[in-house]
Amino acid sequence: MTNVVLCGGSGTRLWPLSRKLMPKQFVKLFEKKSLFQETIERNRMICDRCMIVSNVEHYFLASDQLDEIGVSSCSYLLEPLGRNTAPAIALACMDLDPEELVLVTPSDHLIKDIESYRRAVGEAISLASKNYLVTFGVEPDSPETGYGYIEARENDVLRFHEKPDLETAKKYLAHNQESHAKRYYWNAGIFCFKAGVLLEELAKYAPKILERAREAFISAKKEPMIRIGSDEMEAIPSDSIDYAVMEKSDNVKVVRAAMGWSDLGSFDALAEEFGRDERGNLILAEKRVELVDMEDTVVVDTPDALLISKKGSTQKVKNVVERLRAEGSTLAEVHTTGYRPWGSYTVLDESDGYKIKRIEVKPGKRLSLQKHYHRNEHWVVLSGSATVTVGERTYIVNPNESTYIKAGEIHRLENRGKLPLVIIEVQVGEYTGEDDIVRIEDDYQRMDR
């Protein structure tokens, strides 16, 4: 069985912890592990193989975090842009034998009862082996409005329900509590089926998605990983697997489970795991934060952004992210520390006309050969040894030495040593945005920063 791990989504409701270039599945929330790492570890004992479906920008994050937990056997399918879960799952299934069992799991969910989860997967395997599409329903313990619901009788799906209002959610919960036979379950977004069966059902109910996905898969680069082309990906209609297939097919079964599941889709959900203070406040901050006469408040402090919200209103955080993007702010995209395939950078200070960064380059890695139109750069080496290319000249810069790159000069920074290279970069110019970059050569085949 292959575990298809879906790494899409940007976790906008957990801003400012989660950003576009560091979405919630890669943020280390619990015991210095990310939800992505926990997903991989949870399923590696159940599945023979894993395939990670990720945005191309997140490949190096996934790769680094797999290295941290000692996993090196996963394959990758990289998307240039997101088109929701139906295309992602279809593309993954096209790379598998039609008889291969597939366990599709989001990478950003929390599951605390691993034994119950494994029993549910075992039941799902039994049903999927009989050519059913299997979805997972979680027994609700509260009238949650942030989840879709599955109405079921035993393993039979009666109906899928959209995210309800509070009164409807209360009715669902009351029915379960008052009836001998529970009927309503949270839709966990976990699926199990044969790869070929899923593609057959797509052909029936979403043929355009299947057709465009197949064209994209055929034209994709296959080595060393599957990379879908931008134009081909954009041509695939965007839809979720629930809308495209599960809600239409008459070949669907549900496995019901109480497995300590949460999609951690808001700070209210996160507060249930972290706990609150005596006044019901959730405070996530590196510095000491004191609240006076405040109750049921969420406070999230990061180096470059502060969020304060009433409990119960944190689903609206995504509206803040939409406003930031409309304003052209980078706060929705990246933290002060940004991660790249070659290492990381941290913005130490910036204002009109300058930006100061701490840059760390991994051993054996190098940045792209590039140039900037609007800024000059001063590099000071703190530790390690920098191999610097400027124009036709390549030279070494050692600790406590510096170099200077004029705007418009083609240049590259490289670490040929065995220890991390750390430099301070001072950018000076009329514009210091991350998008002022022209790549001439790049080891990571990036089209933008």
Image (cartoon, grey):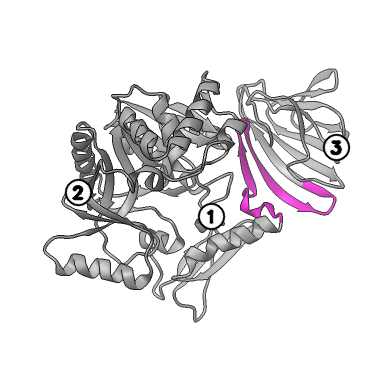
Distance, label 3 to label 2, CA atoms, is 61 Å
What residue appears at the point 44 percent right and 70 percent down from the top-left corner?
312
Q: 7 left or right of 332?
A: left
> In this view of the protein, which residue sits in the foreground, 134 or 394?
134
Q: 426 left or right of 252?
A: right
What residue is shown with label 2? 156
Estimate how packed mark 3 is, as few (under 14), some (14 to 19) or many (20 or more) residues with alpha carbons within 10 Å.
Answer: some
Q: 134 left or right of 239?
A: left
Tell me the element at label 2.
Answer: strand
> In this view of the protein, which residue sits in the foreground, 334 or 203?
203
Give x and y (percent) for residue 90.
Answer: 42, 33
**Quadrant containing the C terminus in the rendered view:** top right
What residue appears at the point 33 percent right and 45 percent down from the top-left corner?
246
Decide which of tag 2 and tag 1 comes sooner along the chain. Answer: 1
Note whether residue 204 is visible: yes
Q: In the drawing, what numbered circle is on residue 12?
A: 1
Q: Answer whether labels 1 and 3 touch (C-beta < 8 Å).
A: no
Estimate how packed mark 1 is, as few (under 14), some (14 to 19) or many (20 or more) residues with alpha carbons within 10 Å.
Answer: many
Magenta span covers which residues?
328-355
Q: In the drawing, what numbered circle is on residue 373?
A: 3
Q: Residue furthest left?
A: 180
> In this view of the protein, which residue sits in the foreground, 80 or 430?
80
Q: In the drawing, what numbered circle is on residue 215?
A: none
Give x and y (percent) for residue 235.
Answer: 57, 36
Note whether residue 71 is visible: no
